[in-house]
Every structure is written in C-alpha cells, then in structure tokens.
Image: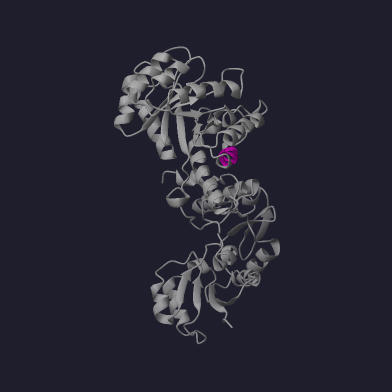
Amino acid sequence: MTSLQKYLLITGTIANRALASVVKTINCDLFCEVKSLRCSVAALMTTDFIARKLEEYASLSGAETIIIPGLCQGSLESIKQRTGCQVLRGPKDLKDLPAFLTGGIYLEESLPDISEGSAASPMQILAEIVDAPRLSLAEIIAKAHYYQQSGADIIDLGGDVHGPFPGLREVIRSLKAEGFKVSIDSHQREDILTANQEGVDLVLSLNSQNIDLGQILDCPAVLIPDDGEDLPSLYRTLELMEKWHKPYILDPILPPLTMGLAEGISRYRTLRRELPGCNLLMGLGNVTELVDADSTGINALMMGIATELNVNYILTTEVSHRARGAVSEASRARHLMYRASIEGRLPKHLDYGLLTIKDPYGNRFNHSELKEMQSVIKDKNFRIFVADKSIYIFNANMFLQGTSAQGLFTQLGICDVNHAFYLGRELSKAELALRLGKKYVQDDPLRWGYINESEVE
C-alpha cells in the first residue's frame, strides 16, 4: 500500500483558519498539516525566518514537502539545509493551493508556450496593411514590424481600388530586404504585375475578370468567386489554374454576421469535403471589424472553426479601433485551437492569453471567512478583498463592505496623503475587478491576458 504524500503548509496567524478551510477541500491522497508561525502576515515572513522557526519543529522527519507562502521573500536553500526537507514556494493566493498540489493549473501559473514546437499551428497569418498606397515607406515598415511581432507570417499590402500603388516596387524591395514575406491585395493589373516581378510570395485575388494573370504569375494566387456568384465560378477559375499547372489558394469569401456568415462557413466546409487536398484562405476582417463586440472572443471562435476546417491561411487586419490587437488574438488562437485538436481535448486550461476581460478563476473568499480573518488581526493595516459581489476593507478596528470605491474610502478617515493615494488606487482597482468579475489580489495588478504581455514596463 502506498503511503500518503506529506505536506507541511506554512502560514501566518491571520491566514491560519482560511488555509485550514482550503485544505479540507483537497480531495486526493495527500496528508496536509498546517503550521502557523508567530507572524501575523504570511507574506512578511522571509525564508530565513521560516528556517529558524522550523529548526526546532520536532515533527519534521525529512519525508515532508514544505510549502511556504508564495509571497515570502528569500532563497529556499536556508529552509532545506535546516530541515532536510524538500521546499516549494506555493501560489500567491492560498485559494489556488488545491490546483497547485494536485497538478492543476491556477491563475498565476505560467502556462507553456504553445506557439513553439509540436503545438505550433501550421496555419499562416496574413496581416493586411490597409490603404498601404497612402502611407509612407517608413509607416509601412513600422506597421510590418508591428504585425510580425504580433504573430503575422506574411505582410499583405492592401492596394487602392481606384488607382495604382505609387512606389510599390520600392516598398516590396524594402520589405523583402528586411526579411518579410509579402503578399499584394490589389485589383490593379499593373500593381499585380509589378509585385510579381519583385518576387511577392502571394497574390490576392483572382476571379474570372483577371484570371489570365494567373498564367504568368510566379507565386500562388488566391482565387475568389465572381461578384454575386457562388462556388461554380470558383471551380471554373481553379480549373484554369490546374490546366496551366499554377499553384492556387481558394477563398470562397466569409461574409459579415447577419449577412450570410453561416452560409460562408458552409462554403468552406463544402470545399474541404470536395477538395480535401486544396489550400484554403479565410478572411476574418468582415467578421471582426463589422460587429459591436470585443474581437478577442470572436477571433477565438473563428480560429476554432478554421482549425476544424483545416484552413491553411488566415487574412486579418486591424483597421477599426475595436479590432486593435486582432493579429495577436488570431495568432494566439490558432496555436490554442491546434493544440486542442491534436490532443483531442477542449481548448480550455491551455492558454489564458485570450481571457482579457474575464478571468479563468474568480475571487473565492466569502463573508464569513473574511470575518474570521479580521478576528485575529491586531494591527491597523487595511486588507482589501473582493468577494460575494462586494468590496471588503478591514483592519483590527474596522470592517467595511460595499460596492463603491469612493463610498468605502470616505469612511476610512485617512489623513496621510501617501496612504490615501495607495488605498484609493487599490479600492478603485477592486471596484473594477468587482464590476468585471475579475480576480482581485491586493498589491497585484489586474490580469488582462495577452495585453499584459505587451505592456511596456
């Protein structure tokens, strides 16, 4: 019979009861003992302090794993040397302890990078620089670098419907010189011919009106249906490309929501079923740019559909303000959906980067637990929590509950300017977390998914 794994959980006097309650919820073959040291706030303990206190703890046999609070500062070596036990730094939030002990995923944990290795999606992203003819070369290069850093594989130069692209040759040469893959999205014959001469990697888009260009192109061409027609016109153009032995990619066009999106998805499904080996391109701009909804979830959904349909190329852009970050979102979503598909699992608990407004976990304390915590506090320092659809702020002498940062702040009677600024900032952050249903941890920034990763420190 296998013996139970033993854990010694270190905490301070204030969090002792809360930690004991959490331990009771752990439902697995673990033996967990809670050890409260003589320090009110667990986060203020250092590893040297813990080592000194545990050196006299007779129950230690060396078989235990000691878990110290996640906010404790210092090297774990001092504890290991004095106790002979394995030592781990636990999560910052004790409510994440069950997931920590059982191998689950918790909010502060750094998830593996799924954009590399076997989990990386083979799907290619084209990021369109819309109205490129009206931008300077420096602006185009800057936008190309931004899109590349966001995850784009190909920089798409969006041409002008009403006229040629001035300086197109120089633009393509400059982008190629900097190592970018380039595509041209134009209805102008001269632009397409110039781009082909300069070695673009892809041309968008050909139909029956300009399919003759496909015979002379040196790169793959994206084929689209004729205006007002469906798949039959697309089949006619691809038959010509096959006759000429020219490479092509099919784009049956994805309309906006309420304007035929479901039918558009059906066309992709038909092509994948009837032509299982062909390359498909799906443009997301009609969906992400033309709806009053956050683009993050829309991109995740559309990339999931694209993954199921084995779409090879995704065309997206960031024209409207509401679609800012769409390239990053599409790139992150393709890897998330690809990994879920190859592992045969749901796209859940793999990458929290697309959870920007909402969090995977909420605030787990309740009113009674916070009252218990307050009962052992002996100092005047304020603790702030979000729980039970309320903001809580308390110390040894005061316990306040409310939903308004300003309403709570006016009851505190703070005179010191620095302290007032700190509490005002934390209460405002707590109110924002309350309104959005986000997880709030005092002194920690709110979590905004992939947006946090792009912040400049």
Instruction: Determine the residue located farthest toward the bottom in the rendered image.
Output: 58
From this view, report whether residue 148 is shown above or below residue 255. below
Q: Position of residue 97 (x, y in %)?
A: 57, 66
From this view, report whether residue 269 is shown above or below residue 82. above
Report whether 362 appears left or right of 53: right
Instruction: Work out whether residue 331 or residue 105 is closer to the camera in this orientation and state it.
Output: 331
In the picture, the quarter occupied by the N terminus is bottom right
Q: Position of residue 256 (x, y in %)?
A: 62, 27
Q: Position of residue 249 (x, y in %)?
A: 48, 29
Instruction: Work out whether residue 190 or residue 351 is closer to the camera in this orientation and state it.
Output: 190
The colour mode here is: one colour
Q: Position of residue 346 (x, y in %)?
A: 60, 51
Instruction: Work out whether residue 375 or residue 33 is closer to the camera in this orientation and state it.
Output: 33
Report whether 142 appears left or right of 222: left
**Magenta-tinted stretch:** 296-306
Q: Quadrant of residue 131?
A: top left
Q: Quadrant of residue 393?
A: bottom right
Q: What secondary structure predominates along the stretch shown in magenta?
A: helix
Report whether 333 appears left or right of 163: right
Marks counted in the figure total 0
From this view, report whether residue 37 is shown above or below residue 347. below
Tell me what residue is drawn at x 33 percent, y 29 percent. Answer: 175
Instruction: Determine the residue located farthest toward the left in the rendered image.
Output: 177
| The stretch drawn in magenta includes residue 231 | no
Q: Can residue 42 be seen here?
A: yes
Instruction: Determine the residue located farthest toward the top in the rendered image.
Output: 163
Q: Can residue 130 be seen here?
A: no
Instruction: Work out whether residue 209 or residue 80 is closer to the camera in this orientation and state it.
Output: 209
Tell me what residue is drawn at x 55 percent, y 42 percent. Answer: 307
